[in-house]
Image (spheres, rainbow, N blue to C red):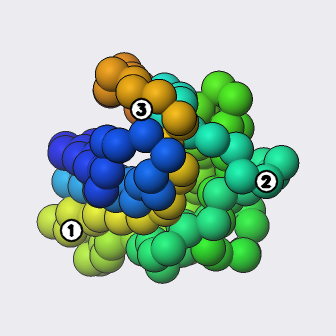
C-alpha cells in the first residue's frame, strides 16, 4: 500500500455519514493471492440492521466480502467492534508480460453509516492486508 485516505461526509451526531476509503499500491492486486483487507476502529456507528454485511454505495470492480465470493456490492462488517473486511475476486491493475514494469492499482470503497447520538472524537483506525495463498511466500503487512 503506497497511500490510504479515509474521509467522512459528516461528523455530526445522528447524521448519515458517507465514508470514502481510497487506497493505492505500486503493484497490481492479484485475486489468486487471496488478499484480505482489514480496517479496524470504525466504532461509534448505530447499527441499523443486525447484519454481517455492509452494502457499498460504490466500489472498484472486483471487490467483495471475501476473496472467493463473486457477489460484489458488500463487505464483511462487525458494527460492535468496528471491523470491516473485504477481498478481491478479480485482478485489480494490469501486469505486462514478462513483468518488466508492473502498473499501480487502486481500490475505492464508499459506504454510509449512521453516527451515534453523541459527539465522538475520531477513533484510531488500523489497516492490514493478509495474503493467504501467495505463490512464492505468504505474509501480512500492517499500516
For the residues labelled 2 and 3, the Cα–Cα distance comes to: 25 Å
Q: Residue at x 72, y 52 (%)?
A: 48
For the residues labelled 1 and 2, the Cα–Cα distance comes to: 40 Å
Residue in front for this viewpoint, 40 or 67? 40
Q: Is residue 57 placed above or below 3 in the rendered structure?
A: below
Q: Is residue 107 placed above or below 33 in the rendered structure?
A: below
Q: Where does residue 35 sit, x and y in percent of width and height?
A: 55, 48
Residue in front for this viewpoint, 130 or 11? 11
Where residue 49 is drawn, which disc sits there?
A: 2
Return the residue found at the far right.
50
Q: Is residue 96 placed above or below 102 in the rendered structure?
A: below
Q: Where does residue 44 sit, x and y in percent of width and height?
A: 53, 30
- Give the mark, 1 or 2, whose residue is nearer the N terminus: 2
Q: Is residue 49 left or right of residue 123?
A: right
- Give the mark, 2 or 3, whose residue is nearer the N terminus: 2
Q: Is residue 81 left or right of residue 25?
A: right
Q: Is the C-beta separation of discs 2 and 3 under 8 Å?
A: no
Q: Quadrant of the C terminus?
A: top left
Q: Residue at x 69, y 29 (%)?
A: 80
Residue in front for this viewpoint, 73 or 70? 73
Where residue 103 is drawn, which disc sits there?
A: 1
Nearer the camera: disc 1 or disc 2: 2
Reading the image, the residue beneath label 3 is: 127
Q: Residue at x 33, y 72 (%)?
A: 93
For the residues labelled 1 and 3, the Cα–Cα distance comes to: 22 Å
Amino acid at each position: 500500500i503506497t497511500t490510504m485516505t479515509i474521509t467522512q461526509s459528516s461528523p455530526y451526531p445522528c447524521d448519515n455519514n458517507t465514508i470514502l476509503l481510497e487506497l493505492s499500491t505500486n503493484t497490481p492486486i492479484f485475486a489468486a493471492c487471496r488478499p484480505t483487507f482489514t480496517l479496524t476502529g470504525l466504532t461509534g456507528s448505530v447499527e441499523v440492521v443486525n447484519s454481517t454485511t455492509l452494502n457499498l454505495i460504490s466500489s472498484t470492480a472486483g471487490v467483495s466480502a471475501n476473496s472467493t465470493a463473486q457477489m460484489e456490492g458488500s463487505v464483511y462488517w462487525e458494527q460492535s467492534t468496528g471491523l470491516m473486511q473485504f477481498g478481491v475476486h478479480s485482478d485489480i491493475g494490469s501486469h505486462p508480460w514478462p513483468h518488466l514494469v508492473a502498473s499501480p492499482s487502486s481500490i475505492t470503497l464508499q459506504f454510509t453509516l449512521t453516527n451515534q447520538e453523541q459527539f465522538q472524537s475520531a477513533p484510531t483506525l488500523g489497516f492490514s492486508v493478509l495474503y493467504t495463498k501467495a505463490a512464492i511466500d505468504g505474509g501480512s503487512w500492517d499500516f
